[in-house]
Amino acid sequence: QVQLVESGGGLVQAGGSLRLSCAASGRTSSTLGMGWFRQAPGKERELVASILRVGNITYYADFVRGRFTISRDNAKNTVYLQMNSLKPEDTAVYYCAANPRKTSADAWGQGTQVTVSS
């Protein structure tokens, strides 16, 4: 079992930046990939970005490509999401996930709120 703890959410004005962190503990050796999802009120949870442990192969959803960057520090078992040029439509609860697929994952963090004001 992997435990995930997010941090770094908050309130920011449009055009600003935030960096989310996700610390993993437990059976991290079973984690081949890490990712971030988000869920806005009244909407389904959607995959934002993911990164593989080996090769650092990344995936980005079209709506964040060029603005967000996912990275990981394997020594610290931590994954980051650098969010730049934030828009009000980026407002959501962001969830860290272990071994993410398109609409599911093996483990989830508790979520961190990101609010972008216009």
Image: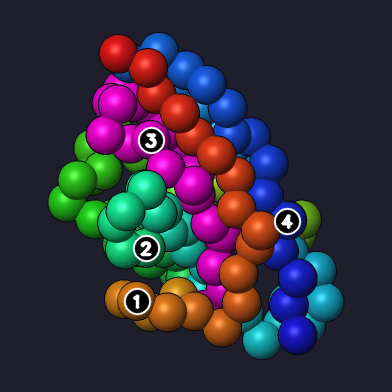
Whole-number angstrom distance, CA of label 2 to CA of label 1: 7 Å
Q: Which residue is mark 2?
A: 45
First of labels 2, 3 by sequence position: 2
Q: What is the three-letter code of the residue carrying label 2? A: Arg
Is disc 2 surrounded by few (<14), some (14 to 19) or many (20+) residues within 10 Å? some
Is disc 4 surrounded by few (<14), some (14 to 19) or many (20+) residues within 10 Å? some
The region drawn magenta spans 81-99
- Locate residue 78 relative to residue 49 in the image: left or right: right
- Tag 1's secondary structure? loop
Q: Which residue is mark 4?
A: 5
On the image, the x and y values in percent for residue 26 come to 82, 77
* Residue pictured at 73% horizontal, 77% vertical: 2
First of labels 2, 1 by sequence position: 2
Is disc 1 surrounded by few (<14), some (14 to 19) or many (20+) residues within 10 Å? few
Q: What is the three-letter code of the residue carrying label 1? A: Thr
Q: Which residue is mark 3?
A: 91
- Locate residue 89 relative to residue 16 in the image: left or right: left
Instruction: Give the numbered dot on residue 103.
Output: 1
Instruction: Give the numbered dot on residue 95.
Output: none
On the image, the x and y values in percent for residue 71 come to 51, 50
Magenta segment includes 98: yes
* Residue pictured at 75% horizontal, 85% vertical: 1
First of labels 1, 3 by sequence position: 3
Is disc 3 surrounded by few (<14), some (14 to 19) or many (20+) residues within 10 Å? many
